[in-house]
Image (cartoon, coloured by chain):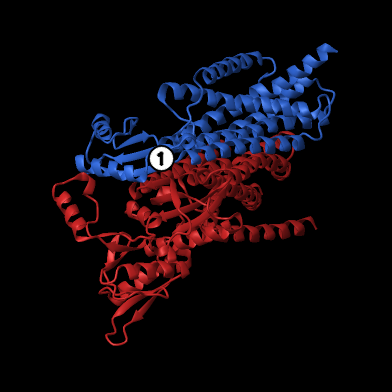
């Protein structure tokens, strides 16, 4: 099977262009909803498998204790999740006491309370994490492409890799802007972690193709650049898809059978992996060709 | 000549393979650890994170505003020691108490695994300071308060009708040491207190003020001794003679010496996970991991056939080896750590896929099966190395610059990636060299 990716490249360009536009619009319009990790707040999970109480009943009780901002969601039909502003340990005990008094056989599964100071710290740490990963990857790119010079200089490979990387990160982020707006999904430190892991994957997948282009340029410098790119994509495509497939298989297993608390994390990784593979095949290398053509036209 | 060389390298390969298999089997038993015939050291359990074993993670902020900068680190380690002693009194298995400096603030992190009564634990850590001396109220005051309480006046409901904190206040802060002593004639145990100079002065004032009255000694808000003052006491020595058993007196001395906190602390955050929720998450995580592993193996078998079979063997060796290493280090397995490991299972076959694809290409170029495989291993190495570098960079950054939840993930993924580079290459190559040769000859 030999596909002429270079010839059909405008379709993936259009497809990606549309999705990225939608993602950016979502991010601008709705923004991202910061989770408890970043804002501080409290979270209480109740086990209601023995006594099915409803969110309304629970809200009544909370209101009687002056907790008016509680957001109650159910996880499956065995637990209820209550989110509030940060509450003190005393208030927490008061709430638990009251809940046990009103409803029998309701157990506390989990309680988390984060002060705003910790929230700020996690936010800062996430930001520095992103900066360091990007820096580390940029350094790695400079190293990986140090030997390329013709027909395009090495920094251009770097730029193309970074474009592919932005592509792979913007799409899940945009998706989260919509999910945040319509379903209340929040951005927490696991979201940032997933994005950073996607960064790593995406870069490596893209580098594989670009690396092959570089190798071919060395071996057969006379062949047309477009043809070289096309051959390189075709040669590396199988390994690209297969390595991603192995990863996708375990991610799907985690998504379907794994614990609920990992679902958001796993779904971002899944989306990122799929788009990362796609972009390294359909976007990154063809872009290199268009850049090359654009520069030459000017001359 | 050629033949001898081949035979030699074959025996070498065979030895290599035997060693790998032995390591794998030992690692497998060690990581499973659930057989009766195993020696005890192999039965060590995994170290589980609080989110899968159930437990509480508390972050306190220490108020060091009154402490000169030069004393901060000694104060913090003092604080840690006091808290550690208190937590130990609580009888938690393997409690962790750590200090951390974040920006300008000083933190104390306490991890308690498997505590049922978190409320009590939090109280024990944060409050206990309190050895306190109280003076007797006048009779009118006492009667007045009791009347009010009988009338259910909410303002007086929680007021102690008999005693009031001494003026000037005398607390555990002024305590130099406490000692368990036995009365030389009755052999009853009592606790002897020695105040520091300031405390001795206050004690002298209080005793002279309260002659023939009770000067009550309270610990954690409970009266533990109600001695009547006979005379002014100078020199700062006091005795608590309750009707103690020796054990009670000993415990009291321990708690008094464990002492008041050197600086006030404030609870910034707590995370408590119930044991049942933790166990449920763990089971689901393990289940997902096993299913993921099986899916990857099926994929490799279907797509790469014989090669895939050996890659799958290498993957199983990888799994056993990493789990054994998690136990050895030991790595604390949190839920995100388990996720990281499961992810690494998907990435572990990466190297094999690279090698097999490369071998196929080499074969297309006209090389025979063997040479194609050998070339595949040789030529795929730079891409294997490169492709793992970016993941390793990400993991290192995540490990060093983020929070504990993310750390667990980064660590298992990092260890996984490094080990998989070894197993996917070394183990698979040994298998192929030994078995492929036989098959094709």
Residue B49 in sight:
no
Viewer-proximal residue among A183 and B296: A183
Q: Is residue B275 left or right of residue A226?
A: left
* Residue extending furthest toward the front: B209
Mark 1 secondary-structure assignment: loop
Spot the red chain and give its letter.
B
Locate the N terminus of chain B and report the quarter of the image it occupies.
Answer: bottom right
Viewer-proximal residue among B242 and A261: B242
The image position of residue A238, as x and y in percent, is 63, 31
Spot the blue chain and give its letter.
A
Q: Is residue B76 above or below residue B403?
A: below
Residue drawn at (60%, 18%) of the image = A16
Residue drawn at (73%, 44%) of the image = B378
Pointer 1 residue: A259
Q: Is residue B297 above or below residue B239?
A: above
Viewer-proximal residue among B218 and A251: B218
Residue B244 falls in image quadrant:
bottom left
The image position of residue A259, as x and y in percent, is 40, 40
The image position of residue B415, as x and y in percent, is 58, 50
Mark 1 nearby-residue class (10 Å; few <14, some 14–19, many ≥20): many
């Amino acid at each position: 099977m030999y596909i002429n990716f270079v010839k059909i490249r405008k379709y993936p360009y259009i497809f990606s262009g549309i999705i990225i536009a939608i993602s950016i619009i979502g991010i601008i319009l709705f923004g991202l909803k910061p989770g408890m990790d970043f804002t501080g707040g409290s979270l209480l999970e109740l086990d209601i498998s023995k006594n099915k109480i409803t969110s309304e009943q629970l809200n009544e009780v909370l209101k009687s204790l002056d907790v008016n901002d509680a957001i109650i969601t159910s996880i499956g039909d065995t637990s209820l999740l209550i989110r509030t502003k940060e509450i003190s340990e005393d208030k927490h005990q008061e709430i638990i006491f009251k809940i046990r008094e009103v409803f029998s056989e309701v157990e506390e599964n989990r309680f988390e309370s984060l002060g705003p100071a910790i929230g700020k710290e996690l936010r800062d740490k996430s930001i520095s994490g992103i900066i360091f990963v990007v820096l580390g990857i940029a350094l790695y790119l400079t190293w990986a492409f140090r030997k390329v010079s013709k027909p395009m200089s090495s920094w251009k490979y770097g730029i193309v890799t970074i474009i592919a990387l932005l592509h792979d990160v913007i799409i899940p982020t945009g998706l989260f802007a919509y999910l945040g707006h319509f379903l209340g999904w929040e951005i927490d430190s696991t979201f940032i972690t997933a994005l950073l892991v996607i960064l790593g994957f995406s870069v490596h997948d893209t580098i594989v193709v670009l690396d092959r282009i570089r190798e071919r340029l060395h071996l057969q410098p006379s062949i047309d650049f477009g043809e070289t790119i096309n051959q390189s994509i075709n040669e590396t495509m199988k390994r690209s898809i297969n390595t991603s497939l192995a990863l996708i298989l375990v991610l799907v297993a985690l998504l379907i059978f794994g614990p609920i608390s990992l679902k958001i994390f796993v779904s971002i990784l899944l989306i990122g992996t799929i788009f990362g593979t796609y972009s390294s095949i359909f976007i990154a290398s063809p872009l290199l060709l268009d850049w090359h053509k654009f520069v030459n036209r000017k001359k | 000549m050629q033949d001898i060389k081949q035979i030699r390298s074959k025996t070498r390969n065979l030895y290599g393979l035997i060693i790998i298999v032995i390591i794998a089997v030992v690692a497998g038993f060690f990581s499973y650890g659930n057989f009766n015939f195993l020696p005890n050291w192999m039965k060590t359990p995994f170290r589980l994170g609080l989110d899968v074993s159930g437990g509480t993670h508390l972050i306190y902020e220490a108020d060091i505003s009154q402490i000169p900068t030069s004393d901060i680190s000694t104060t913090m380690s003092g604080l840690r020691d006091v808290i550690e002693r208190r937590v130990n009194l609580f009888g938690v298995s393997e409690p962790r108490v750590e200090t951390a400096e974040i920006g300008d603030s000083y933190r104390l992190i306490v991890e308690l695994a498997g505590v049922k009564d978190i409320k009590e634990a939090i109280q024990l850590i944060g409050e206990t300071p309190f050895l306190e001396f109280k003076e007797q109220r006048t009779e009118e005051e006492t009667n007045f308060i009791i009347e009010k309480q009988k009338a259910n006046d909410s303002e007086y409901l929680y007021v102690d009708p008999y005693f009031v904190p001494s003026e000037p206040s005398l607390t555990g802060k002024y305590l130099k040491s406490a000692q368990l002593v036995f009365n030389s004639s009755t052999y009853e145990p009592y606790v002897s207190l020695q105040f520091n100079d300031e405390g001795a002065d206050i004690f002298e004032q209080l005793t002279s003020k309260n002659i023939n009255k009770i000067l009550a000694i309270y610990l954690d808000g409970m009266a533990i001794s109600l001695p009547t003052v006979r005379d002014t006491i100078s020199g700062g020595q006091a005795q608590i003679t309750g009707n103690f058993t020796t054990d009670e007196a000993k415990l009291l001395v321990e708690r008094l010496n464990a002492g008041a906190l050197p600086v006030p602390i404030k609870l910034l955050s707590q995370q408590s996970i119930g044991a049942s929720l933790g166990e449920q998450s763990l089971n689901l995580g393990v289940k997902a991991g096993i299913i993921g592993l099986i899916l990857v193996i099926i994929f490799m078998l279907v797509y790469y056939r014989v090669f895939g079979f050996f890659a799958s063997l290498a993957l199983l060796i990888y799994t056993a080896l990493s789990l054994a290493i998690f136990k050895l280090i030991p790595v604390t397995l949190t839920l995100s750590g388990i996720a990281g490991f499961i992810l690494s299972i998907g990435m572990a076959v990466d190297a094999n896929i690279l090698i097999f694809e490369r071998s196929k290409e080499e074969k297309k170029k006209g090389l025979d099966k063997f040479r194609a495989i050998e070339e595949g291993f040789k030529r795929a190495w730079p891409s294997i190395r490169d492709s793992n570098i970016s993941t390793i960079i990400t993991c290192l950054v995540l490990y060093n610059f983020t929070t504990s939840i993310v750390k667990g993930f980064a660590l298992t993924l990092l260890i996984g990636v490094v080990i998989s580079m070894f197993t996917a290459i070394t183990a698979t190559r040994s298998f192929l060299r030994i078995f492929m040769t036989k098959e094709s000859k």
